Image: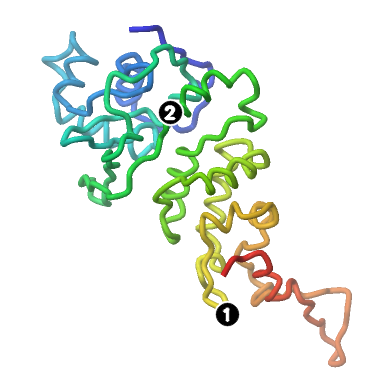
């Protein structure tokens, strides 16, 4: 098994810091257990024997099952099923590890017939009909191109963007497939987004926006494609144009304290014209 890379940022990662110590230890052992593509069996007995060979009498299958659930909820891993067998994949593997092998030892999430396994509010597993589109060839290219400018947007993490949108923007339609036309628009906008953290913030803004979720005169609702259609839509979300208006700014108006009306009181100045909110929408 090749050596793995651990970066100093693990010490300041809020995601890792939220884990209990035993879960964090399990996560690190997963890192050195998975193959070159961050994939391994999701069977609890196999994981227990492989990750804790000297503690097999102390660590139970139920412990592994519990820790897997925590890592899924923390977006550090995800599960998928292929031909009746479950596998796990570390979510951000390609961003931190080097790929040496030409192909994975295990079936990959981008294979036809692979299905993501999600969890309901009670922790029960649900097999979705929506496949996980993580291209192994894309992963290899991203690793090879990392030194050429991943931060500048020369590579595009399509699968991560899809996963984040589907997870955060629960009020919107799920992205079922990254078609070539979609990838073209996403790639262009990624040059402006630049980081996964920024995109997750954008998704949180969308999910929090009453307007984008359909609370508007035309009952229009935003979509993944609308977000990436042009730079105007993306910038408006980032700049807070669709944020819910606070008290004193209801219905798109805010008080202008420097102007007096005929009744001696302050007048209301339009914050935006309603039709302008739709100008870039494809409806």
Above or below residue 246? Residue 198 is above
How far across and how far down the image is residue 135, in percent? 42, 32
What SS does tag 2 mark? Answer: helix
- Locate the C terminus and report the quarter of the image it occupies: bottom right
Q: Earlier in the sequence, mark 1 or mark 2?
A: 2
Q: Which residue is denoted by mark 2 in the rendering? A: 16
Label 1 residue SS: loop
Relative placement, left or right, of 1 versus 86 is right
Q: Using the image as rendered, state which of residue 283 and residue 29 is in the foreground.
A: 283
- Could you tell me which quadrant the N terminus lies in? top left
Q: Quadrant of residue 117?
A: top left
Left or right side of 240 for 257: right
Neighbor class of circle 2 (other Cα within 10 Å; few <14, some 14-19, many 20+) is some
Q: Nearer the viewer, residue 255 or 176?
A: 176
- Total labels: the figure holds 2
In the image, is residue 136 above or below residue 257? above
For mark 1, does the 10 Å Cα neighbourhood hold few (<14), some (14 to 19), or many (20 or more) residues?
A: few
Rendering quarter of residue 205: bottom right
Q: Residue at x 63, y 67 (%)?
A: 246
Q: Position of residue 278 (x, y in %)?
A: 65, 70
Residue drawn at 45 percent across, 60 percent down = 172
* Camera-side residue of 51 and 217: 217
**Residue at the spot x=61%, y=55% of the render?**
229
Cα distance, mark 1 to mark 2?
43 Å
As drawn, the residue found furthest toward the front would be 180
**Measured from the top left, where is residue 128 in percent x and y?**
27, 49
The image's colour scheme reads rainbow
Task: Tell me whether the residue at label 1 lies in contact with that at label 2, contact meaning CB atoms closer than 8 angstroms.
Answer: no
Q: Is residue 239 left or right of residue 47?
A: right
Residue at position x 56%, y 35% in the image: 156
Q: Which mark is residue 230?
A: none
Identify the residue under disc 1: 217
């Amino acid at each position: 098994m090749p050596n793995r890379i651990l970066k100093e940022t693990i010490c300041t990662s809020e995601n890792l810091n939220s884990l209990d110590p035993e879960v964090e230890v399990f996560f690190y052992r997963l890192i050195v257990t998975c193959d070159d593509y961050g994939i391994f069996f999701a069977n609890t007995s196999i994981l227990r024997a492989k990750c804790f060979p000297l503690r097999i009498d102390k660590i139970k299958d139920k412990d592994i099952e519990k820790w897997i659930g925590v890592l899924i909820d923390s977006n550090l891993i995800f599960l998928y099923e292929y031909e009746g067998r479950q596998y796990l994949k570390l979510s951000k593997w390609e961003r931190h590890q080097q790929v040496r092998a030409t192909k994975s030892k295990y079936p990959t999430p981008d294979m036809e017939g692979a299905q993501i396994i999600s969890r309901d509010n009670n922790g029960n597993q649900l097999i979705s009909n929506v496949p996980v589109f993580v291209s192994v060839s894309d992963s290899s290219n991203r690793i090879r191109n990392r030194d050429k400018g991943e931060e500048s947007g020369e590579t595009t993490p399509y699968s991560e963007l899809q996963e984040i949108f589907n997870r955060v923007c629960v009020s919107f339609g799920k992205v079922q497939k990254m078609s070539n036309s979609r990838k073209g628009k996403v790639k262009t906008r990624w040059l402006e987004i630049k980081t996964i953290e920024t995109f997750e913030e954008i998704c949180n803004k969308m999910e929090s926006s009453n307007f984008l979720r359909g609370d508007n005169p035309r009952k229009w609702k935003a979509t993944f494609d609308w977000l990436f259609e042009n730079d105007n839509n993306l910038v408006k979300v980032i700049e807070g144009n669709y944020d819910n208006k606070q008290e004193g700014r209801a219905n798109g108006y805010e008080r202008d304290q420097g102007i007096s009306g005929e009744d001696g009181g302050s007048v209301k100045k339009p914050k935006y014209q309603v039709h302008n909110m739709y100008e870039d929408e494809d409806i």
